[in-house]
Structure formats: C-alpha cells, structure tokens
Amino acid sequence: MRRDIVGSVVAIVVLTISLGLVYPLVMTGVAQVAFHDQANGSQVERDGKVVGSSLIGQDFRRPVLDANGRPKVDEDGNPVLEADPAWFQSRPSQTDYSANVTFFSNLGPDQKDLADQVKANLDAYLALERPYTPGLTADRVPVDAVTSSASGVDPHISTANARIQANRIAAVRRAPLDRVLALVRQHTDGRGLGVLGEPGVNVLGLNLAVDKEFPLR
Amino acid sequence: MSWQGWLQILIYVAVLTALTPLLGGYMARVYMGRRVALERVLGPVERGFYRAVRTDPAREQDWKRYGRTVLVFSALFWLVLYAILRLQGSLPFNPLRFGGAPWNVTFNTTSSFITNTNWQYYGGETTMSFFSQMAGLAVQNFVSAAVGMAVLAAVIRGFARRETTKLGNFWVDLTRSLLYILLPLSIVGTLLLVSQGVVQTLTGSVSLTTLNGFEQVLALGPVASQIAIKQLGTNGGGFFNVNSAFPFENATTFSNFVEMLFILLIPAAATYQYGRMIGRPRQGWALYIAMLLMLAIGLGNAYHQEARATPALTAAGVHATADGGNLQDKEQRFGVANSALWSTATTAASNGSVNAAQESFSGFGGMTPLVNMMTGEVIFGGVGSGLYGMLLVVLLTVFLAGLMVGRTPEYLGKKLQAREVKLVAIGTLYMPVVVLIAAALAIATPAGKQSIYDAGPQGFSETVYAYTSQTNNNGSAFAGYTGFVQPNAPGNDGATGVPFADLVGGFCMLLGRFIPLLAALAVAGSLAAKRPAPAGPGTFRTDSPIFLMLLVGVVVIVAALSFLPALALGPIVQGLTNQLF
C-alpha cells in the first residue's frame, strides 16, 4: 500500500508536468512556427484590419429602425435585427453568432418551440428572397437556410442556398448575375480530398469578394 | 441518403480495418515487452520513470495487487484534479480570469475525467482556465485512457497465460501505453489538426469588428493538443461547449475524418492486439467482425433517420431532402452522413465527443447513440475498457452455449466455473441496475426533474440518456439536460450546477468505471491460474460464424431485456408519432 502511494504521488507529479505542460507547450511552439495562421484562428484581414476568421460564420443582419430612425429593441432591451439584403446571409444561429460562448439549441425533434423557430426562419427567408427569385416556394428552400447550425457559427451555407441568394445580391448591388454566381463557385469549399463531407459556400469569403468587386455606393 | 454519403462511410470502414492489424500488431509488441523502434529514443525516459516510481519492471503483480495500484493511483489523481479545478482562480495560464466552479460541479467533472467519461456539466470556453484544460483535464485524457489500456493488457495476459497468478506490472503497462502509443499518435494528430485550422495558442481571445459592424470575440486556446488525445483516448470532453461542432475544434471535412478515425482507432486495434497476445489472431478478428456488424446496424439506422425531416421540421413546412436532411443543430460541412457516422462511432466507443447536437436527432435516429451505450459499450467501446467488457460478454456467451448443449463451458481451453460466471454476471449486469435506478430516481423526484429542459417524451429521453451515458463512461449528452444552467456570459465563475444531477451522475461514473474493471481483473486472475485442456471434437469454436451470431444475440438480448421499457417511453414513442410538445 505504502509503495503504491509513494509511486502514485511521484507519477502524478511527473505526468502532470510532462503531459499537462511540456506536451501542450511544445505543441504550441511547433504549431506557432509551422502553421502560424491556422494556429491563431485563420484570421481574415481587410485593409490591414482583422474582420473575422475564415472558419467562423458572422452576423450579416442589420438593426431594424423604428419610425424615428432609432434602432428598435425587444422587451429584453436587445436590438431587433433583420437580414441585410446587401449581403449573403449565414445560417440562422441560436447564439447570435457568438464565437466565445457556444451552446446547442437543445431542442428535440418533436418540440413545438423548434417548429415555431423554423417556421419563422422559413417565412423570413421567403419574404427576403421572393422579390428577387419569383416563384420561390417553401419546398424549394434548402434546409440549411432555415435550421440553426450546431456551432452557431457555421461558416458555410449550401450551394443551393447561395444560388438563391445570388439573385438578390446581383439585384441589390447592380452586378451581373453570372459574375456573382462565378464568385459563389470560387468560394465553394468542395468535399475534402474530393470525397469527404459536404460542399459548402464560405459566406464571409464570398461577401468579402462581392464587396470588393461590387461595393455599395 | 446519397451515394456520396455511403462512399464516405465505406472509406471510413476500409481505413479503420486496414489500420487495425498494423496498430494492433504494434500494440501487442508494446505489451508483450518486445522492443519497439521508439525505445531507441524513449527507452531512457521509460527506465527513468520506473526508477522514479520505485518499481522493478520485471516484478509482476497478481490481480489483487494490480487492481489495488490502479485504485490508489486513480484515487490520488482524483484529489489532485479536484484541487486544480477548485483553485484555478489562483493558478497560472488563466487569461480570461475564471474562478473555480462550485463543489458539486467539480465533483462531477473530476469523477468524469478520472473515469474516462468526460461528461461535461460545464462549458469549456466560459469556465475553464487554460491551466485546468491542459494540466488538469487533458492529463486525464492521457492517463485515464492509459489506465484502461493497461488493465486490458493485464486481462489479456490472464486469458493467455497458464498456471500463474501474475498478470503484469501496472506501472510498466501504464508507461508503455503513454510513451509508445498515446503520446506519439497525439503528436501526429495535433499537427494534422492544426494544419486544418484547429487552434493552438496561449492567447485567450481576439476581439474584432465584423464586415457588417458587429463585435465578435474569437475564443482561442491550446485546443489541438487536447483534441488529438480527446479523440484518441475515447475521452470526448470538448475544449469548447459545442465540442467538435465548433470550427476551432474541428475545422474542415478532413479534420473531421481524422477525428472520427481517432475515435475507433485504438479500440479497433485492440481486437487484433488481443488475437496476437493469445496467439490466435482469428479470435481477435472474430470480435472485430462482431463489433463492426453491430456498428453497421446502428449506423444504417442513424443515417436513414437523419436523412429525413423530423416532426418539427415537417410541421414548419420545410421540405427536407435526401442531401439536406435533418440539418437542425448540424454543420453544413459535415452534413447528415458525417453527423450520423460520428454519432454512431462516438457512442459505440465510449468517446462521447460530438460534431452535431445529439438532442436534435430524430426519435429513432437518437436511438442509435442511446442503444449503442446500452449494450454496455462493447461495440469497440472505450480504449481498453471496451474490449475487457466485451471479453466478459464472450464468457457469458460461452456459458450460455454450454448450458444449451449441456457441456462444461470452456474458452481458449480453460473451463469456466462458478466463480468466473459470478464475476461475469457482476461485471455485465451492474450496468443496467445502476442506470435504471439512477434514471428512475431522476424522473421520479423534483430534484431530478429540475434538470429536464425539453417537454414531453424528449425530457424523459434526456434523463435516460444522461444516466446511460455517465454509467457507461461515454460522456455524450442530450445536452438540454441541465444545459440551461450553463453560464452564458463571458467571465462567469462557472456553472452553478444542480447538486442532484452532479452527485448522482458522479457516482454513476465511478461505479461504471471501477466495477467492470475489477470484475475483469478478477476473472483474468482466476483464468490465469487454470491449465488449458487441448481442444477436442466437442469443443465449441469461438471464432466461427455461429459463435459470432450468438455473441451479437447475447449483447442485443441483454440490452433489450434491460432497457426496452425505457426506450418505449422515450425515443420509440417519439419515432412513432408526429405529435409536437
């Protein structure tokens, strides 16, 4: 028993230092040298300023203004937001696109709250896109556009979703649709190694490219 | 379902199967004390460690001494981890200035990581300092995994040896697991993950203004080094609250493949290691095939169910197509195929990490993870613990087969007697008993019901899932269960927790870890003492298709007898109706 205790105490100290400090710190050092950008969050800059991470989705909504031109707030005092037509929209987020406080929606497959949320997302999507995509019906709306993602900051939308939104972007930014669709293709991350995962359009990358080529006045 | 989805699943299985004999053969060498290439570099470290812990590597222990060393080592490490987590406010590497969590949450978290469960009642990025993550939790990711692998090595020796009491030296098995298997693979894994964009830095966070003028804070940290071992050691505890759904923890479809492969890599290789160590590779492959078969059934179900709309999506008027499917709480880059595959693998192995929210799976789709755990984590299972759990079920199957034909049951030529069968019964049946008592307490008392988040049968499913997961040392969750007490403001001192859920869950995890561990060691101890008889014409072959079917049948029947009523009240009722709650 005494031998076990003495051995365990020594082992705990040695293992905590070697596996708990030396291993992660050495790996940090190697990662910072070998993969500097990736190790620090794949930050994206514009005009020398960090505007996001290529791996993290962003909020492309805008505040709703009341009759006096002031931002409207809900009963909790939070600003009311709506999709900004000038940008490709990310998937809905249960965390308001927080990249430092994450949680799942935790709504089960048979929860009324979930059905209500998805219904609201669907109505909003149709209201936003129908003027630019005439004849768009609920059964043609891609699922990713109306369901919240797992991380809350899904950087991607489906290609079907992006193609619908492209009609709006082309109209709002007075850009040729062909060119916008070409940018969508350019910013589509294909399946890994050609087979893994699902294709997705990187919304931040796409919006940066669109904004560079077709800036708002 | 799409052919691309099935192709990815096939590739996954092919790669896993190809790596099984390679890594398994290597692991057998490590535990048989053969020289491995890494010893040229790490040999002095290994011998230095033996001197430091004052053990003579040539001196082996019997099952009681081996078990006692495991218990003492685990108990003392429990105390140290508890202290680190409580005192993190005064410890270094705490850029976001987090205080310690309350005693009840810390009891749960400490028990969780010591037992290789990694159930999380805390949100990583909002409660844990980098010191707690690196020097507290990630150390356990290594050590609890290595303890499981060491015990498995000792148990296998009990099956392989004859007329001895010695099963091996715990310190040797622990050290060789860490030095020659877990650490090298973790280093490779870390670099692969960082190259994909999984972060690895000591900077706490970066604040920025987004393209459309919102403030966004990117939470960073030493993530990749922890995620590599979290996947490899069937631990599963995420650096971030949403685990491997978060892009900084699982950045690309390729990192996703690596992380999924790491979930089953060592448990699968252990089947081959077993075959080699007992000198009968066919026996190892037989177990591999039985496990793969059960995995495939669960996977087919999960993929099929998730490719369709849930009642909530249908009610909202969404047309969920085959390539879209139930994307609620799933990531676009992974899609339903990879979410279903991950969910199946992580619950077959006692990993518990997730890349999509289990809670938002459909009723029947959510049954795959739940039933996987209810089999007692023997479909590959945890590193070490999965195979020694499966070996107990093998003995149970042999015993039942013996009863059917009226012969004394024997396995590998060794006769099973009353003592072994009693131990097998304890080692396999404690689990449903603990799960059902805990879940019944939690569903029948106000203190337990306090933790439920979702209405209707989903709330019941949450409860059953929580105690099944913790007792089986899995760690995945229908995360609504107590999820609402998670802090949602940065700088928060930690989840306040629900004492009932924290304590009952904590005890479930401790019982679920150490009862089967000791039962398996005791069985191995008594098998080691036996003299094997040569196989005769009446010997029941344990590497034949008939035995495989019987084995799978026993796993399924034991789980069904124990849990069918509970399943009927939760996921089955949800799968059968379109009713909303």
Image (cartoon, rainbow, N blue to C red):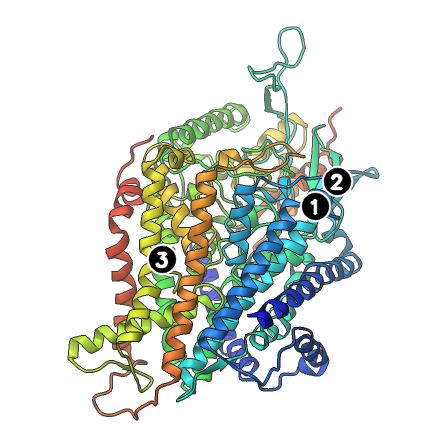
Q: Nearer the viewer, residue B507 or A164?
A: B507
Q: Position of residue B7 (x, y in %)?
A: 46, 62
Spatial distance from mark 2 to mark 1, Cα to Cα? 8 Å
Spatial distance from mark 3 to mark 1, Cα to Cα? 35 Å
Where does label 1 land, which residue? B220
- Marks 3 & 1 on one chain: yes
Q: Is residue B55 above or below residue B98?
A: below
Where does label 3 land, which residue? B298
The kind of residue tagged 3 is Gly
- Marks 3 & 2 on one chain: yes
Q: Position of residue A56 (x, y in %)?
A: 65, 42
Q: Is residue A170 visible?
A: yes
Spatial distance from mark 3 to mark 2, Cα to Cα? 41 Å
Q: Position of residue B560 (x, y in %)?
A: 26, 56
Q: Is residue B254 visible?
A: no
> Is tag 3's residue or tag 2's residue first in the polypeptide sequence?
2
- Left/right placement of residue A54 relative to residue B377 reads right
State how many labels appear.
3
What residue is at 64 percent from the left and 13 percent from the top? A65
**Chain identity of mark 1:** B
Helix or strand or loop: what does disc 3 sit on? helix
Helix or strand or loop: what does disc 2 sit on? strand
Q: Nearer the viewer, residue B305 or B160?
A: B160
Front label number (3 vs 1): 1
Where does label 2 land, which residue? B206
> Is tag 3's residue or tag 1's residue first in the polypeptide sequence?
1
The kind of residue tagged 1 is Leu
Helix or strand or loop: what does disc 1 sit on? loop
**Chain identity of mark 2:** B
Q: Is residue B430 above or below residue A113?
A: below
Q: Is residue A33 above or below residue B390?
A: above
